[in-house]
């Protein structure tokens, strides 16, 4: 049986800015240095962080950042949503956490055949790396213990056990994400766990312009939008938009242009599916489509923020119920004590 060893790759030019629209936090570059040059940290006896916690509003690119780290370091990527760990059946959560870490560990190891063949050929096998990304960490690691079930406690305990059992030689890096940093259990943020926090900011003007250029760049009409300053105009107007919101806006504008093309061809009695006869003049991104898409996304964002401000707080509800039952139990105990004293008298 013919067996091929994995190719030995030369280090890339690890320029995160090439994979990211805008300026990344300085901590992001530090994390990449830790991942790429672990021997330097080992030489100085500096403990390498096992995990980092990404914090930011929805749509700011937390998942994309984790995937980007895995891509530029040639690491295997393992994604898991914390909310999917626990189900109706008790014990599934801890088991899934163990399986996740075991799969990541296996991806960093070479088989015996690979090791023997490399030894015979005098080849040094390159290190394999893995990135585990846990989204929605606050779904299980919420500091409000009243929201935890016994199953959730088991899942968090298993996660902490896996984190504490990791060493720098495992070549596994853990990245987690949350939209609410204040709700994360302090136990998860202790030294040796998720002790590094990176705040993912909303894109600035230059970042928003790059995003618009990227998502609209391949569409007919892009040159006009760029030359007449329309893209810069909307890069200014989209202040407060996340990267996902700008992507959604560009997609909505593109869909509107495509819909116009389809309707136009139907009215002319032309086949819609014949791409060789499509008139690019009909399928053109114009300021009209961008303006409508901008207003739609802006309305949606305002609605979401308004809903969040009046949303019923589950945490407060649980706390109120707990206080109610504690007060009832205290009153019942006082009544029983009073009744006992009456009987003695």
Image (cartoon, rainbow, N blue to C red):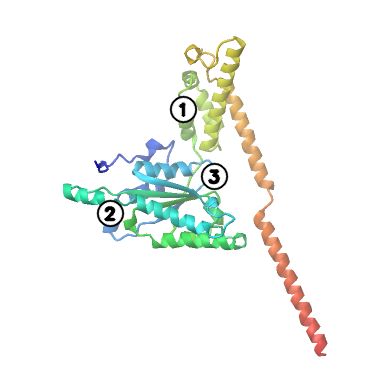
Residue lying at the far front of the rendered structure:
1
209 left or right of 2?
A: right
Q: Residue at x 49, y 16 (%)?
A: 275
Dividing the image into 4 quarters, which one contains the N terminus? top left
Q: Residue at x 40, y 41 (%)?
A: 68
In terms of sequence position, does the residue under pointer 2 or pointer 1 come before the other?
2
Residue lying at the far top of the rendered structure:
268
Q: Residue at x 80, y 90 (%)?
A: 344
The image position of residue 18, as x and y in percent, is: 37, 36
Q: Is residue 227 above or below residue 61?
A: above
Residue beneath label 2, please? 40
Q: Is residue 242 above or below residue 107?
A: above
Between marks 3 and 1, how big is the CA–CA gap?
Answer: 23 Å
The image position of residue 244, as x and y in percent, is: 52, 37
Q: Specify whether residue 190 is in view.
A: no
76 left or right of 307?
A: left
Residue beneath label 3, please? 57
Q: Residue at x 38, y 44 (%)?
A: 70
**Viewer-nearest residue: 306 or 104:** 104
């Amino acid at each position: 049986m013919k067996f091929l060893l994995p190719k030995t790759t030369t280090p890339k030019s690890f320029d995160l800015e090439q994979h990211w629209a805008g300026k990344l936090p300085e901590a992001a570059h530090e994390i990449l240095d830790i991942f790429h040059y672990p021997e330097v940290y080992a030489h100085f006896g500096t403990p390498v962080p096992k995990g980092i916690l990404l914090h930011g509003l929805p749509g700011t690119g937390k998942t994309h950042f984790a995937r980007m780290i895995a891509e530029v370091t040639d690491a295997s990527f393992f994604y898991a949503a914390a909310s999917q760990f626990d189900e109706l059946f008790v014990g599934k959560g801890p088991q899934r956490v163990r399986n996740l870490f075991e799969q990541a560990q296996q991806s960093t190891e070479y088989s015996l055949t690979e090791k023997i063949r490399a030894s015979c050929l005098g080849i040094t096998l390159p290190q394999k790396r893995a990135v585990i990304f846990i989204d929605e960490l606050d779904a299980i690691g919420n500091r409000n213990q009243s929201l935890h079930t016994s199953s959730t406690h088991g899942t968090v305990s298993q996660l902490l056990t896996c984190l504490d059992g990791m060493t720098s030689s495992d070549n596994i890096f853990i990245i987690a994400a949350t939209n609410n940093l204040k709700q994360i259990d302090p136990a998860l943020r202790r030294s040796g766990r998720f002790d590094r926090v990176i705040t993912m900011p909303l894109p600035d003007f230059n970042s928003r312009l790059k995003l618009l250029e990227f998502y609209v760049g391949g569409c007919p009409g892009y040159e006009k939008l760029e030359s007449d300053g329309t893209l810069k105009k909307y890069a200014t107007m989209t202040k407060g938009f996340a990267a996902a919101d700008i992507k959604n806006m560009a997609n909505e504008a593109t869909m509107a242009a495509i819909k116009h093309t389809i309707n136009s061809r139907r009215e002319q009695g032309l086949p819609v599916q014949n791409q060789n006869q499509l008139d690019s003049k009909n399928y053109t991104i114009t300021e009209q489509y961008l303006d409508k898409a901008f207003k739609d996304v802006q309305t949606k964002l305002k609605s979401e923020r308004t809903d969040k401000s009046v949303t019923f707080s589950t945490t407060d509800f649980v706390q109120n119920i707990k206080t109610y039952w504690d007060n009832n139990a205290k009153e019942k105990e006082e009544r029983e004590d009073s009744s006992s004293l009456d009987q003695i008298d």
